[in-house]
Structures are given as structure tokens and as C-alpha cells.
Image (tube, rainbow, N blue to C red):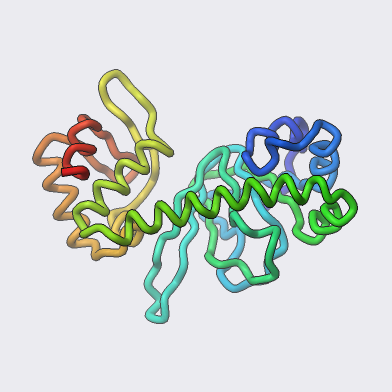
Amino acid sequence: MTRVNKENAAEFLQQFPIFQDLSPEELKQVEEIAISRSINKKTVIFSEGSEKEAVFFIRTGIVKAYKTDENGHEQIVSFLKTGDMFPHTGFFNAHPYPATAVAITPSSLLAIPVRHFERLMLSTPAIAIKIMRVLGDKIRELQDKLQVLSGQDVRNRVLSFLLMLAEQHGQQQADKIVINLPMTHQEFANSIGTTRETANRLLNQLAKDELLEVDRSRIIIHNLQALKEQRDA
């Protein structure tokens, strides 16, 4: 993990909802405590259970966040991309990191040390009030997504996860949506809480129906509307 240029950090940070209500002067104060990092592929950024030292913002790259159960099985929490922050509630509690984060592509991050940020909020309460308001909305959004996924059968979880990936990572190319995400079938299965065999069977059926095609580095959705209709049926 190496330092990179911190140029335009304030402009970059303002793109995040958590900082969108800050004034230029307040953003400048946040920029002064931020640290830029360049992360190599497969580098662990932090480990589940370790002391929380910083919150991270992705300039470029893809990061995987996952938890490990008592049997050592990986449960993927999310795939994070350019423009995402993690962990979401990192500034506001003293708990250790809730998951492990690893770069799955070379990544450029901006890190804000928690202790420095706490001192900044104590000295400038207006920043704390604005940020806590935005974070409350984000937590409700994540809870809604979790409730939708947990209340579905496996097939609908597959469809919902594919639609979520299309929304968050998809790129329109002609009449197709290409999701450039290096994800194994096991990682896909872990993301929706099922076995690799079940995930493979359902993905193969969708491919047989000519709705999508999947390989190790990307997913191509040929008919997004058909996926939505199958999920909502």
C-alpha cells in the first residue's frame, strides 16, 4: 500500500452523499486530514475484527467486502466500485471492522483516519450534523435492500442480485449491459447465501434462455427487461 497524490481530493469527496452538503471551507478541512493510497490487486485493506483506523473512498478499482463464518466459509457483503465508501458507519462507532476488505483490481483509495475525523467534528459541529443526517438515509437504504433479498427464494435472490449488479456496475453497450466484475461462481453464490451448485444451475438456466452469459471476468445481460419480469412475476 503506497501513497499517491492527494490532488483534487476535496472535489472528489464532494461527489459522495456523505459530504455533499459541506461548504467549500468544510470540504477543505476534510481534505487536509485525508490520505491517498495506491493498492495492489489481492491486497487486504483491512481484516474483519481488526481495530478500525480509517474509512475509505474508492477513486478507481473494485474492492470486495466479506465476512467469514465459524466454519471458515466466506459470505460476501458487497462489491464496491469507484465512488463507493466503506465501511459505511465507520466514523460513528468504536467497533472493529465488520468485514474484511480486499482489492480485486488495482485500486486508488482516499483514506480518512477515524481519530482525525472525530477531532474535526468536535471542533466543527456543523460538519457532524450534516454527515450524520446523510448516513441515516444510507443505513435505511441498506436495510431495505437486505430485507428484499432475505425475503426471497434463491431464484429471486439470483435475479435481484443480477439486477443490482447491473444497476451498480453495468455499462450499456449497444442492446446489452456488460458487468465487468471479476467474480467467481463461488463468490456469486456467497453473495446471495446459497451453494455454488445452486447458483451455477440457475445461471446456466438463464444462459440457456439467452438472457445472459457469464464468465470469470464479466456478466453480459442480453435482456434486462426479461430479468425484471421474471423477478416480479
x 13%, y 34%: residue: 210
Q: Along the horizontal axis of the image, is 53 left or right of 47?
A: right
Q: In the rendered view of the protein, which quadrant contains the C terminus?
A: top left
- Of the pair 49 and 132, the residue shown nearer to us: 132
Q: How many numbered tags mark residues here? A: 0
- In this view, the residue farthest toward the bottom is 70
Q: Along the horizontal axis of the image, is 225 left or right of 10?
A: left
Above or below: residue 118 compared with residue 217 = below
Residue 152 lies in quadrant: bottom left
Residue 62: x %, y % from top left: 50, 45
- Of the pair 190 and 107, the residue shown nearer to us: 190
x 87%, y 49%: residue: 124
- Of the pair 82 and 121, the residue shown nearer to us: 121
x 10%, y 38%: residue: 209
x 59%, y 73%: residue: 49
Residue 5: x %, y % from top left: 76, 37
Above or below: residue 197 compared with residue 169 = below
